[in-house]
Amino acid sequence: MSWVSAGLAVVCLAVAALHLARLALHAGGFGDVPGGPVGEVSHAAMALGMAAMFSPLGDPLPAPVWTVVFVLCGLWFAAAAVRSRSIGGDAAHHVVGSAAMLFMLLTHHNDADLPAGHAAHHAAGGGLGPVPLVAIVLAGYFGWHALRCSDALHADPPVGPAGGGAAVAQRIGALRSARTVAVAHVVMAVAMTVMLLAMI
């Protein structure tokens, strides 16, 4: 349904705006934002890419632009994972996320029978071919990631209203909180799971 796709596009745009705001906090000297500026850029790019794929109005950017963005993100965080000698953690999640975005992007742009921006990207030929199998694996990963991040929703309980400078500091603190990051991650994981399941 187009209204569902439009709603998910708006939600993904809101997540992108959140990560860009967190990036601005980092640039404004408010201290280290968890994940660093490159992480915030990567999350914002994924959210904008998802919004473009869900949008009933179509994708304003050509596929090669998105391809370059997510290849660069994937390579950057793959190098970070190699340097840290760890297959887990934030860098590995960015690698999986970039790979998933490339997978959805290429499938989306190669499916000429579907309206632009529609979330239902069905594989041709029926049956469980390579595209549905990869979609199932990735949907399982992002479903697990959503559950994992939901644990952090209990962190940093909100405080009461404040005025003046305290209110500004409170809003900045909310943007930087683990709860805010967890909400953004859960929303994006659910959106990606929805799109991936539509490809089966």
Image: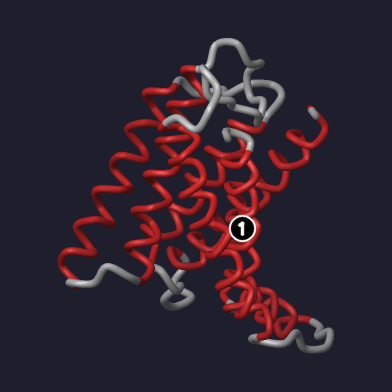
Q: What is the tally of numbered marks visible in this picture?
A: 1
Q: Residue at x 68, y 84 (%)?
A: 154
Work out which quarter of the rendered image holds the N terminus and state it. top right
> Who's the residue at 39% across and 46% down the image?
98
Q: Residue at x 65, y 28 (%)?
A: 120
Asked if 59 appears above or below 8 in the picture, the reply is above
Give how far across and how far down residue 108 sits, in percent.
52, 25
Q: 41 and 3: which one is in front? A: 3
Quarter residue 189 falls in: bottom right
Give x and y (percent) for residue 46.
49, 46
Give SS at disc 1. Answer: helix
Q: Residue furthest front?
A: 127
Q: What residue type is labelled 1?
A: Leu
Judge left or right: residue 75 versus residue 173.
Answer: left
Measured from the top left, where is residue 9 in percent x and y? 69, 39
Which residue is identified by label 1? 18
Colour scheme of the rendered structure: secondary structure
Q: Nearer the viewer, residue 174 or 57?
A: 57
Which quadrant of the figure contains the C terminus?
top right
Q: Is residue 91 left or right of residue 51?
A: left
Using a 10 Å C-alpha cutoff, classify the residue at mark 1 as few (fewer than 14 neighbours), some (14 to 19) or many (20 or more).
Answer: many
Q: Quadrant of residue 170?
A: bottom right
Apparent side of residue 142 relative to residue 151 in the rendered image (left or right): left
Residue located at (63% from left, 53% from top)? 15
Q: Which residue is at the far top?
A: 113
**92 over 59 or under it: above or below:** below
Left or right: 29, with 162 as reference point: left
